[in-house]
Amino acid sequence: MFGQESSNGTHDILNEVKVLQDKILRLSKLLDVARFMSFERDLDRLLAFTAQQVTDGLGAERCAIFLLDEKNDEIWSRIVLGETEEIRFPKDRGFAGYTIQTGEVLVVPDAYADSRFNREIDVKTGFCTRSVMCVPLKNLENRTIGCFQVVNKSSGPFDTYDQEYLVAFGSQAAVAIESAQLYREKERVIQDLIAAQSDLKQKMRQLEIVYSLERSMNDSEGFDLFMGGVIQKATEALGAAGGSILLKEENSERILFSYQVGKESQKLSKLHLESDEGIAGFVMSSGESVLDNQVASNPNHSRRIASEVGVETVSIVAVPLQIRDVNSSEECTIGAVEIINHRAGGFSQDDLAVLQLISAQITSAIIRKRLLDEKVHSQRLATIGTLASTIIHDFKNPMAIIRGYAELLQRPTMDQDKREKFCKVVVGEVDRCVNMTKELLFFARGEKNYYFESISATDFVEDVALIIDHELKEHRIRFVKVLEYEGIVRIDSEKMKRVIFNLFNNALGVLTEGDTFSVSCKRIDDRIEFRVADTGPGVPKEIRKSLFNQFVTFGKKDGTGLGLSIAKDIVEGHGGKIFLDQSTEKGSVFVIQLPVPTESAETSA
């Protein structure tokens, strides 16, 4: 018995010694790998070396190293189970996808029994995967950049010690792989920079001029300022004494000196060329550029212009301004740009190339201005039509009320109190129509006229409720008014009624029998809050951000999209704000917040 126990003890000791030796061997290999990875910068060699060391260290058949491509949401590898062909698949696929997504170690004894297993690689390579261990590769920021996937350990299942070893291995590999990736990217960038350097030197002058003109186009206060700045910068860039932008006059063949710079340039603004006169006339009629450092002998030179201005042209470079005709799709010349009298003797081909770039900028500015002019014209026409449609649409309700009360007033048996009340409603609705027309015209013109008065919140809400309650009864919709604040509000009463009625009209278009519409007023700290609510279908989420923009509409098939935009302008004109309460689960609630009147305003009321 004693001998048997002694034998067992010796056996245990030998096993422990073997485990320790194995650990020492693995740690030694890990140190060797760490030293190699510290100086290897080639990503492909590093991946191949690392995969081989993992395979040998764990006694596995093969190893894959998968890396995350965050830009494309993919996982890729060129080192997969001994294959060298790159593969890619979505980042949430397979064991690798699970490990990279979760950052967790994954041990699978039977790959084919696990639903996460991506069998495509086995099908493609003809390899048979049995057991798998995946370990995430985490960088110094603890962010997962990829994973090891080791398959088919030859001596049995993967154990805890295998996991610890591969995690330690992975922490070293992740840093080395990320460094190699950055090094590769840096090398690529350097090569690109070297290749582009020569081109940049050649184009620097041209790019500086184009950039300056683009900045002027964006920063200038208007088209004329931009064009004046362009000819000024073009003249300076080419080292010249003067320059002009010439454009065809509308409805004639004359050529006008539209923008000019240089000595006596103001005289040019009063002159013009005929369609075939001067070098500019030749450039525009032929569509060809001109570079001439001996203008005196040029047969196209206009001595008349030189005489009237009092400046002799010695050298010139001129290019046509051409745009594509929308109808014929052909190039048509609309003008020319010319620079005269080079200060250093004469213009060069480089000067001509630069001026051609500048002419393209000028042409772009002209096209942009024409498009903007056409857009403004179209918008004005559309606004006129929309305003007319809005007036017709918004007049329906007050006209119906006026008609209804007029019919009631025809009854001879009506008592005097009701007659006076109904007459007040009719007058109020007529005023409402007049004010709606004024508001729309003010809105179209951008005018903001307010007539503020201090009135009680009770009177204001009661006036609004009188109209709303009558209309809702016809539709069998319940009306609720809540007055928690009955003090003074300082408002333009007619305009603020317009706000409430706009909200009411929007709600009326979507409410059905049995729904509820309510108007409430209360004071919260330093503001007075009106809440206009309904139990309808609510405002669609997709238009809530743009709800108060012009021409945004919902719910009403004949809506114009101006009501809420007008309402916003009016409320802001009162120093308040209007918004949709998005915390409401059912229906819609619009909140109007106005400042509390000062004591002097309340006293004057």
Image: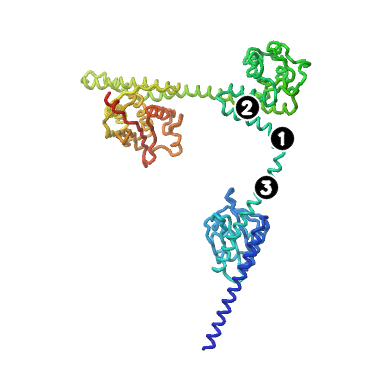
SS under mark 3: helix
Q: Which mark is residue 188?
A: 3
What residue type is disc 3 on?
Arg
Expressed as whole percent of the image width and height from the top left, the position of residue 437 reads 39, 21
Q: Residue at x 56, y 61 (%)?
A: 135
C-alpha distance separating marks 3 and 1: 23 Å
Front position among marks 2 and 1: 1
C-alpha distance separating marks 2 and 1: 24 Å
Query: Is residue 402 among the parts visible in the rendering?
Result: yes
Position of residue 408 relative to residue 138, above or below, is above
Could you say which quadrant of the image residue 217 lies in?
A: top right
Is 220 on the left or on the right of 208, as rendered? left
Give the colour scheme of this rendering: rainbow
SS under mark 1: helix
What residue type is disc 2 on?
Ser
First in sequence, mark 3 or 1: give its number: 3
Residue placed under numbered mark 2 in the picture: 364
SS under mark 2: helix
The total number of labels drawn is: 3
Q: Nearer the viewer, residue 494 or 431?
A: 494
Query: Is residue 93 among the parts visible in the rendering?
Result: no
Q: Nearer the viewer, residue 375 or 480?
A: 375
Q: Spot the residue most to the front.
A: 344
Callout 2 crowding tier (Cα within 10 Å): few <14, some 14–19, many ≥20: some
Could you say which quadrant of the image residue 128 lies in?
A: bottom right
Q: Residue at x 69, y 32 (%)?
A: 205
Q: Nearer the viewer, residue 134 or 144?
A: 144
Expressed as whole percent of the image width and height from the top left, the position of residue 170 reads 58, 61
Front position among marks 2 and 3: 3
Which image quarter holds the C terminus?
top left
